[in-house]
Amino acid sequence: MDNRQEMARAAAEAAARQSYGKLVAYLAARMRDVAGAEDALADAFAAALERWPKSGVPEKPEAWLLAVARRRDVDAVRRRLTGEAARDHLQLIAEEAEARMTNEDLPDERLRLMFACAHPAIEPSVRAPLILQTVLGFDAATIASAFLISPATMGQRLVRAKNRIREAGIPFRVPERAELGERLGAVLEAIYATFAEGWSDPAGTETRRRNLASEGIWLGRLVASLIPDEPETLGLLALMLFAEARRAARRNPEGDFVPLAEQDTALWDDALIDEAEALLRHAAAREIIGRYQLEAAVQSAHTARRRSGSTDWAAIRQLYDALMAIAGSPVVAINRAVAIAEAEGAAEGLAALDAIGDDKRLAEYQPYWAARAELSARLGRTAEAAEAYDRAIGLERDPALRGFLQSERAKLVRN
Amino acid sequence: MRYMLLIYNDEAAMANAPRDKTEQVLAAYGAYTEALKKSGAYLAGERLRPTQAATSIRLADGKTNVLDGPYADTKEQLAGFYMIEATDIDTAMEWGARCPAASTGTVEVRPIWEMTDYLS
């Protein structure tokens, strides 16, 4: 009996892991209600844990779960019947449905669910968390810790967003061509935000965050496989793979930060880089340039060092020029200034930083001050460099990166 | 689903607009209403008199307080509404964006809370 219970639990958990998102998506698209779909599914899992140890694990666990979950919503029978009678009834329904249904019949509606979560009527900051919860089944506490806000606040935001999907009548569909651009942008942005949250823990010491990076890539693969003719879906996947390929090289064995220029290219993952290159070529063949393709191209130029031994900074600068034109932001402007410094000289780079210096957002942006500090130091402007390093150190939250900045500042004083 | 499109406009600007401009706006609303009707989405729609004609009522301690004016003193005022039938928020938003008020003020799209929803 114990053994059977164990098996049933393991089967239910396996079904949950493998197909949670698919089941939620399938139900939510039909009920037009994410919270309702999650509740129904939670009940179905509870019923499975109770039922399967006695009756054995059904041949198609997903179909069984779905049948029970659907019935819960569609039929009021469950509310009228209680106890043993209800369970028998559910069992019958499930077996009947299972007989009719194969796993191939379960259409993959996760993309539709993602478009609902990233709908313009949903607040942008909650879109990525919502996708994590509904498509991947993360609980609010896990998501909250990854996005560095309190679990209670995250829980409230998620509940509010799900209510909004139901009450406002947000559709579960992949938008048509005409509006796909903007909507797809929101989905890709949410996926990238997921990846970036995981990426910000480079050592992978925080397991939850590392998971976020791989979940982001997983979602990216899903979207790229379902909408392969939109080159930006391939561009985003390539961008994430390029970054992921360098993970092992971002810290030395002591856990200290290693800047890109000093990374040991032998530690880069060649298979991931090759896959990213192939994706990028595939995307470029469609000749519709976009933000993610350009960012991936920058990464491609950086990783070229593993073969050539040097970095083509003039090419990187051109890519940033193009990025500024189609998706300009302070972050892009700083990276462009760094590329200018490498290609033309520190003075030119610093001048490019000066040109964006009156953007108020930069006052609290660590990379801006770190870039200023490094370029000032190269020009021998020690006092300015020290002040900029202090700003950067004070703004950094990652201890390894903070340590790196502090050691750079220390070198400055010695000179 | 049924949706209410609430139209908010700067009514002073509307009142001060030259006559030809006003006629142009009215014609635009006429065409919009006609398009709604032709598509089958139209359920109802009316224009409201300016807030100077508004009266707000509140009952407190058994006494009726009557306020000469609108409930909220805002930069843009509720000026009218449409009630439409739409399959989802996307369709409702499309109609909201087509409304002439979307380019002069704001159109708020609100789903109707159907009795069947809150009693179930």
Image (cartoon, coloured by chain):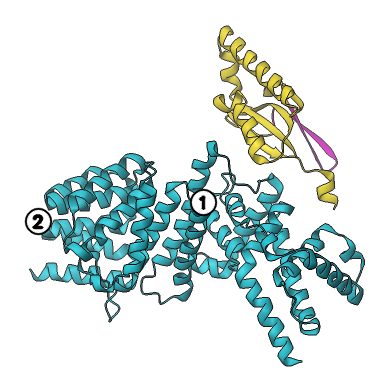
Chain colours: A cyan, B yellow
* Nearer-the-camera pick, A395 or A67: A67
Which of A294/A370 is in front? A294
- Secondary structure beneath dot 2 equals loop
Q: Does any portion of residue A357 appear in the rendered image?
A: no
For image coordinates 43% across by 48% down, the residue present is A232
The segment highlighted magenta reads B55-70
Q: For residue A261, which quarter of the picture?
A: bottom left
User: Mark 1, residues whose alpha carbon is within 10 Å: few (<14), some, or many (≥20)?
Assistant: many
Horizontal arrangement in the rendering, residue A317 relative to residue B84 (left or right): left
Q: Per the image, is B57 magenta?
A: yes
Task: Report the side of A304 relative to B12 (left or right).
Answer: left
**Which residue is denoted by mark 1 in the rendering?**
A187
| Classed neighbour count for the residue bearing mark 2: other residues with Cα under 10 Å, few (<14), some (14–19), many (≥20) | some
Q: Quick one: A25 or A194, which is closer to the camera?
A: A25
Give the label on residue A379, or none: 2
**Residue type marked 2:** Leu
Q: Name the one closer to the observer, A74 or A60.
A: A60
Pick out the residue farthest to the bottom. Answer: A2
Q: Is residue B31 left or right of residue A408?
A: right
Residue A108, percent from left and from top: 63, 58
**Chain at numbered mark 1:** A
| Main SS category, magenta section | strand
Vertical order, B44 against A37 (above or below): above
Distance Cα–Cα, label 1 vs label 2: 43 Å
